[in-house]
Image (spheres, grey):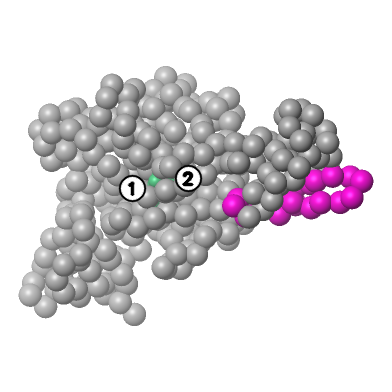
Amino acid sequence: MSDLAFAVLRALADGRFHSGEAIGQNLGCSRTLIWQAVHTIESDFDLTVYSVRGQGYKLSQPYEWLDVPSIRHGLASESAEVWTVAVADQVDSTNTQLMVHATSDGLHGLVLATERQTAGKGRLGRRWHARLGTCLMFSILWRFDRGIAELAGLSLAVGLALARVLRQLGAPVELKWPNDLQLHGRKLAGILIELSGDALGPAAVVIGIGINLHTPAEIDQPVAALSDCGIEISRNALLALLLNELHEVLSSFNQHGFAQFGKEWMSLSSHQDTPVRLSFSHGDPIDGIARGVAENGALLVDTPDGRRVFHVGEVSLRRME
Ligand code: BTN
C-alpha cells in the first residue's frame, strides 16, 4: 500500500482538491483503493488530508518532494563534480542502503536522501524516527585514503560542516560531543557514521545525517527544529548547501585530519567548561568538567582523578545541572 500511498501523495502535493475519481483514472485504480491510500497517508505518514464531498481530497498544506534536479541546482561547480545524488520515497535506512554500496564498488560521493525510513538508525543502537516531510534525512558514501584508525575525529568534523551552514542560515546551533547538533539545548540533528575497511588501508565511510526542519518526533530527550528559530527552507536547498560544505570539510579532513578544525569546533561546543556526566554501555558513569577536544577529536574531561580522555565510541554525554 505504501507505493500507492506515495503515488496519491504525489497527486495531492500541490495542496489543491483532487477528486478520487480523477486520481484513480490517472493511476489506473479504483476510487476505493485511492480512499484506502488516503487513509494510509493519514495513519502511517501522519499527514492531514481533507475529504470534502463533491470536491475530493486535499492535503492540509502542499508537500515539497525531494528532487534531484533541484538539489543539483544548488551545488557549487566543484562539489557538483563529486556528488552523485539519488532520492527514494522510502527505504529501511539510507545508511543501511549505502553500507551495501560501501562494501561493494559503490561510488565515492554517492548521496541517498529519502522521504521516509522504516528502520532509521541512530547512534548506540537507537532508532531515528521522523514524520514525513519534517526532517532532512540522507547518507553519503565517502572513500578516504586514511585508514579507519585515523578517522576518529570525523564525526566532529561533519558536525562542524553542518553547524557552519545552519549558523549561516541564522540558527544559533551548538555542537554536542561527539556528533549532535543542538538548538537552545535541544537536539536538532544527529549524525551516524558507519565504517568499512582496514585500520591502515583505505576506508569507506557512510555518513548518515538527520536534521529536523519542523516539529520533530518525540524521543528520549528534548528535541528542536529549524522552524523553532523561524527558519523555513526547502529540504532540497538545504541539502545542496550541506553537500557544498561537506565537500570542503571532507576533502580537508582526508588531507589533514581533524586537528585543523579543533579550535572552531570548541568555539561552538555546547558543553565547554561545564559539568558533564559520561555514561557507558557497561560500568558506572563518570562526572567531570568538559575541557574541549584533543587533536584527534577525543573529549578531555577533568575528573576528581585528574584529566581523562574519552574516545568516540560507546559513550554518551549529558550536561549535569
Ligand atoms: C543519532 O543522533 O543518534 C544519529 C541519527 C542519524 C539519523 C540519520 S537519518 C539518515 C541516516 N539513516 C539512518 O538510518 N540514520 C541516519
What is the three-letter code of the residue carrying label 1?
Answer: Leu
Badge 2 is on which residue? 117
- Observer able to see residue 129: yes
- Which label's residue is closer to the chain start, 2 or 1? 2
Q: Is residue 15 magenta?
A: no
Q: What are the residue bounds of the magenta stretch?
A: 44-60
Relative image position of residue 156 (x, y in whole percent): 29, 49
**Residue 283's image quarter?**
bottom left
At mark 2, the secondary structure is strand
What is the residue that sits farthest to the bottom in this orientation? 321
Label 2: few (<14), some (14–19) or many (≥20) C-alpha neighbours in 10 Å: many
Q: Which residue is depicted at the point 32% across and 72% down?
A: 319
Residue 154 vs residue 34, the one in the foreground: 34
For badge 2, the amino acid type reads Gln
> Residue at point 38% right, 35% down?
97
Left/right placement of residue 111 relative to residue 205 reads right
Q: Which residue is mark 1?
A: 192
Q: Quadrant of residue 64?
A: top right
Query: Could you tell me which secondary element the residue under label 1 belongs to?
Result: strand
* Residue 94: image location, x then y, percent: 41, 39
Disc 1 residue: CB within 8 Å of ligand 1: yes
Could you tell whether 93 is left or right of 292 in the image?
right
Asked if residue 51 lies in the magenta stretch, the reply is yes
The residue shown at (65%, 48%) is: 41
Relative vertical location of residue 115 with respect to residue 101 in this rendering, above or below: below
Alpha-carbon span between mark 2 and mark 1: 14 Å
